[in-house]
Amino acid sequence: MSTNTDDQEQVQSDNLQGAHLATQPRHPLLSRLAYGGSLYAIQVLGGPLMWLADWYPWFYPPTFAPTIVKTYACRPSLPTRIFFPKSYDRESSQTPLPTLITIHGGGFCLGRTNEDDEWNARFADTHHVLVVSLEYRKAPYYPFPTALHDVEALILAVFDDESLPVDKSRIALTGFSAGGNLSLTVCQLPSIRDKVKPSAALPVYPVVDQSVAQEFAIKTRYYKPDLGPGGRSKPTDFLAWMVPAFGWAYINPGQSLEDPLISPIYAPRDALPPHLFFVGAELDQLAHGAWRMASKLAGRPVPSLTEKVGQQELAPKPGQLILDDERFAFEHVDEDGKSSVRWLLVPDQLHGFDRLPWSWHGSAESVEDAKLKEVAYQKVMGEWLRDFVWK
């Protein structure tokens, strides 16, 4: 029996040779030109479109607009979008509000805060919290650690802003993809950990482990052709061409990929907020890293790179989460109740499913499924904050 076990472990070890990268490699010249050309083209060509998008609300007021947009002296070029719950009377109420700080995604290179307006407004209204959405400067013009320190400075500015009804004893951080990474890394900085003291971080489909080689990461999820037409059934992960470009732009060659400020999976438990809630998307190469980090911090067996996240079968019901299967949901609460870890895997959906345009989903069924699951996981997150973390 022991011989068979040893043989299996040796096979796994052989299969994972080269899976771990200790430092950021220097990519070949042609790769660097391709990555740089692609990102610069998107950023430059996207400039006029973003300029037009900024004017659009003047003529067609959006349904999910922020209550106010502020700029702080520490980062005057980075506007902060602030969402009050509709039920809050700003004229007469002096009651502090529990506050959720959100950080947008985009691989550290793309994206803007206004892309999260609908998510932020809904969360503020549904759970009666103040939602503050942060901006940061982008790679490759501004590589690591610029975004991290931009977010740090803005969190401190919001914390010290006496014009906002921030309940300083009830602050949580969340972020999406690259923003999920920043939500887990900024809270490790002494200024945030010791002064702001966020009670929770809730990263959504986050980047948590940059040390896993791309060719291994794409094998850690299931591929489901039976999901029908659209992006969900494709035999490739749509992040496959993006992740290397984003990594090249954000992380300089020679940088340790085990730095907890790059890969928060390496952070010690006491450097993170006491309560953590990881949300992954099943059809996403990043989900496995979040699953491993949640398992590690919860004291559960840590999955290897040969164990795929989720299941090959389709979810039983479209539009619903799976809460009775530990592959999709678990919770660990320490004996004293002062710290906890939750894991929630959204079944049958892609990375960024709640922000992808229709053309990326490719079918009305996928869009509808994504919208229902977005509302569902938001509800679980909000109730967890209100009824457990902030109780």
Image: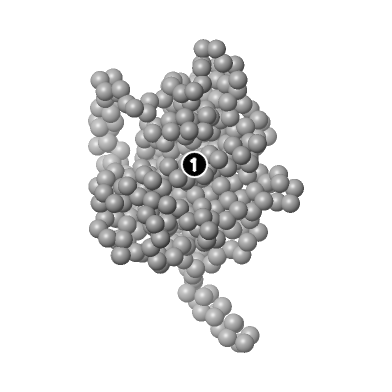
Type of the residue with mark 1 = Lys
Relative vertical location of residue 339 with respect to residue 209 in this rendering, above or below: above
Which residue corresponds to mark 1?
379
Identify the residue at the far top of this view: 91
Which residue is drawn at the image coordinates 35% and 50% (left, top)? 369
Q: Nearer the viewer, residue 11 or 229?
A: 229
Which residue is drawn at the image coordinates 55% and 53% (left, top)? 343
User: What x and y, as percent, mark residue 290?
Assistant: 52, 54
User: What x and y, as percent, mark residue 284?
Assistant: 41, 56
Instruction: Name the quadrant of the N terminus.
Output: bottom right
Q: Nearer the viewer, residue 321 or 157?
A: 321
Which residue is drawn at the image coordinates 32% and 57% (left, top)? 232
User: What x and y, as percent, mark residue 374?
Assistant: 41, 44
Which residue is drawn at the image coordinates 75% and 48% (left, top)? 336
Q: Does residue 254 appear in this view?
A: no
Relative vertical location of residue 277 with respect to residue 194 in this rendering, above or below: below
SS assignment at label 1: helix
Instruction: Name the quadrant of the C terminus.
Output: top right
Q: Nearer the viewer, residue 295 or 378?
A: 378
Q: Does residue 387 appear in this view?
A: yes
